[in-house]
């Protein structure tokens, strides 16, 4: 892999504190590859041969069962997936595909496990990242089980608004069918939910969402940091 990519990978919390020799050892076995959109990178149930690092583009983590499919998360630069399967040497529990042209680093899982056993700083960083992933899963479950579909959509829009800087316009960065899947709805239910938010000042123009009455939407959504703040 070209050394030009080392600094952005090294800057990730997962690799930031590990010994330099161990980091270089990981990178010697890694390689970087460009993928076009809609390419399946890994399949559910396959062996976890690589830890993936997304350098550019975006990746959809999804699962299928009995003819149905759901999106579970979107991975954006610069970040890794799927760490738990790599450390546990277990099959992937999700599939992954590119949403757009993406550049991805593949690090052999056996190398990651070998250095996990010898580098204390790297091991602590892995435990911290896995703990954060676990907490994110708990928050997603609370969002799904404690809120109605209308409340889930309202809080999703508020979270997206915050990430975009807090302005009244929110641009959806993927199609509404996928948004419905992420929020645990059918596309028809999502359409009804958008209409249900109109009394709270929300208007929809394609992928452009305008929040016309911030206070009213927040009163309805009642955002909760123990569900909506994924940084804690």
Image (spheres, helix red, strand yellow):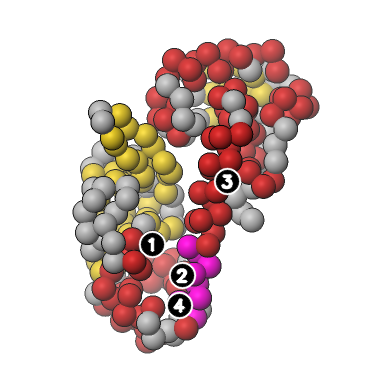
Q: Residue at x 61, y 30 (%)?
A: 147
Tag 1 near tag 2, CB within 8 Å: yes
Q: Which residue is mark 2?
A: 126
Q: CA distance from mark 2 to mark 4?
A: 6 Å
Q: CA distance from mark 2 to mark 3?
A: 20 Å
Callout 3 environment at 10 Å: few (<14), some (14 to 19), or many (20+)?
some
Q: CA distance from mark 1 to mark 3?
A: 19 Å
Mark 3 against mark 4, which lies toward the viewer?
A: 3
Residue 7 shown in magenta: no
Tag 2 near tag 4, CB within 8 Å: yes
Mark 1 or 2 closer to N-term?
Answer: 1
Mark 3 or 4 closer to N-term?
Answer: 4
Secondary structure state at the residue bearing disc 3: helix
Considering the whole magenta stretch, tell me its main secondary structure: helix
Q: CA distance from mark 3 to mark 4?
A: 26 Å
- Where does the magenta region start and end? 121-130
Callout 4 environment at 10 Å: few (<14), some (14 to 19), or many (20+)?
many
Q: Which residue is mark 3?
A: 139
Front one among 223 and 37: 223
> Taking 136 as reference, is 178 left or right?
left
């Amino acid at each position: 892999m070209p050394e030009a990519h080392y600094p952005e990978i090294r800057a990730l919390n997962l690799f930031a504190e590990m010994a330099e020799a161990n980091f270089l050892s990981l990178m010697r076995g890694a390689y970087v590859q460009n993928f076009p959109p809609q390419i399946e990178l890994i399949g559910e149930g396959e062996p976890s041969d690589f830890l993936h690092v997304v350098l550019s583009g975006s990746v959809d983590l999804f699962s299928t069962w009995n003819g149905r499919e759901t999106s579970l998360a979107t991975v954006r630069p610069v970040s890794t997936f799927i760490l738990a399967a790599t450390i546990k040497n277990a099959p992937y529990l999700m599939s992954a595909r590119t949403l757009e042209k993406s550049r991805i680093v593949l690090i052999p899982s056996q190398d990651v496990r070998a250095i996990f056993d010898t580098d204390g700083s790297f091991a602590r960083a892995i435990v911290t990242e896995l703990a954060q992933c676990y907490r994110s899963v708990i928050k997603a479950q609370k969002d799904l089980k404690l809120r109605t579909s209308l409340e889930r959509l309202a809080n999703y829009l508020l979270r997206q608004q915050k990430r975009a800087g807090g302005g009244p316009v929110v641009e959806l960065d993927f199609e509404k069918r996928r948004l419905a899947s992420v929020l645990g709805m059918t596309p028809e239910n999502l359409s009804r939910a958008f209409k249900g938010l109109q009394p709270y000042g929300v208007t929809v123009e394609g992928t452009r969402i305008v929040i016309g009455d911030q206070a009213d939407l927040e009163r309805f959504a009642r955002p909760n940091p123990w569900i909506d703040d994924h940084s804690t």
